[in-house]
Image: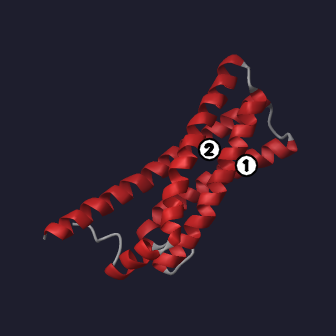
Amino acid sequence: MSPALYTPEQRVRRDKSPWTWVQGLLAPLQFVVFVISLVLVLRFLVTGQGHDAAVQSVVVKTLFLYTIMVTGCIWEKDVFGVWLFAPAFYWEDVFSMLVLALHTAYLVALATGWLDARALMLLALAAYAAYVINATQFILKLRAARLSAAQEAYA
């Protein structure tokens, strides 16, 4: 059996932290923004239409990502006492750095004109693929924590 995600003290801090609620709100909102943006990016890549809407949607998605990362760091500090790379979420945080790097590369390429429109959208898709992997990491980790807590309650 794997170790519990939270110690009893961390679970109390998690439950008391206002950042738990913020993360719980931002995560699904970011996912909705992601889905809308993904559709717009794919529409542009397939039809060549809607370039501006696709670009703007990726910028909005990136702003949501930055927001959830900053608030997530505050949440980790509240719950685990460190701003990032708490042992319980170490690999999720490591992969989050790749997600941030790809989204930031998109913004840099957009601002500098480094990539043409198609290459920029392909970079957005790479960032989105990394985001999906990272979101899946967090979902699986939190699901395992719930199952572990339920098993502890029955024990």
Identified at 51% across, 77% down, the residue is: 78
Q: Position of residue 17 (x, y in %)?
A: 48, 74
Which residue is drawn at the image coordinates 43% and 49% (left, top)?
Answer: 136
Q: Residues within 10 Å of mark 2 (few under 14, many from 20)?
A: many
Q: Position of residue 34 (x, y in %)?
A: 58, 41
| Residue corresponding to mark 2 | 127
**Helix or strand or loop: what does disc 1 sit on?**
helix
Q: Is residue 70 above or below residue 13?
A: above
The x and y percentages for residue 74 are 58, 72
For the point 48% across and 50% down, the residue is 135
Quarter holding the C terminus is: bottom left
Callout 1 environment at 10 Å: few (<14), some (14 to 19), or many (20+)?
some
Report the residue that reaches farthest toward the top: 47
Residue 84 appearing in the image: no
CA distance for labels 1 and 2? 9 Å
Looking at the image, tell me whether mark 1 or mark 2 is earlier in sequence order.
1
What residue is disc 1 on?
105
Task: Give the amino acid at mark 2.
Answer: Ala
The reply to whether discs 1 and 2 touch (Cβ–Cβ < 8 Å) is: yes
